[in-house]
Amino acid sequence: MFACFCLLFLFFIERRFYGESTPFGKKSHKTAEILGYLNSQQALADCAILIRSLKQNLSSEASPVVVFGRSYGETWFRLKYPHIAIGALASSAPILQFDNIVPSTSFYDAISQDFKVLYALFAKMFTLTSKRVERTTENREELRELVRAGSDRRVAKSSRDRQSDRLSDALSGSPGRRYVRMRTCRLVGYLSDRRID
């Protein structure tokens, strides 16, 4: 709606190797040589080429470009290709953490705040689960498997922070997060048979 009102073009670019954008058909995921194209630099270059091509084909080469998205890609695009995009807006791109400009917990604080506003129950479970993971001695084998701590090591007190980080990653957006959420909550005794979506 905003694009129509302001006479803007709005394009959604699908990253190759995902969805319909498989550059080598059924062979796209078969070899390391082909998968070598599945990297962040190539994704940024693909977007740059596509944007320039669209501007040329639409006779709008002087039109400014702003990239929008949900993660690092848009911000990195603006930094790498400032001559193509005049701005970038990413809803979740904590790039300031790389230089220790903001506290290392700020991303998780923001995620927790989002859940507090939108999903009060999940925020409570997230907090309780994190605390229980820190002090639990039971179910460490299942917790280790769940957060992929490693096959030979026990979840020791000294590695508690790493476990908490992995659990946070899993709960805040990794693939299969609903499964991870349910399993984790059951393992630490917070959830019995209640369903969370």
Image (cartoon, rainbow, N blue to C red):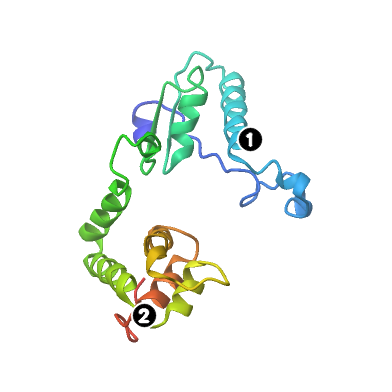
Q: Residues within 10 Å of mark 2 (few under 14, many from 20)?
A: few
Above or below 189: residue 150 = above
Q: Which residue is drawn at 42% across and 60% down?
A: 162
Q: Which residue is drawn at 58% across and 39% down?
A: 40
Rendering coords of residue 146 (x, y %):
48, 72
Front-lying residue, 184 or 87: 184
Rendering coords of residue 29 (x, y %):
73, 54
Disc 1 target residue? 42
Q: What element carries label 2?
A: loop
Left-right relation of 135 to 31: left
Q: Quarter of the image for the C terminus: give it.
A: bottom left
Q: Which residue is drawn at 57% across and 43% down?
A: 14
> Type of residue at label 1?
Gln
Left-right relation of 37 to 154: right
Above or below 40: residue 29 = below
Front-lying residue, 188 or 34: 188
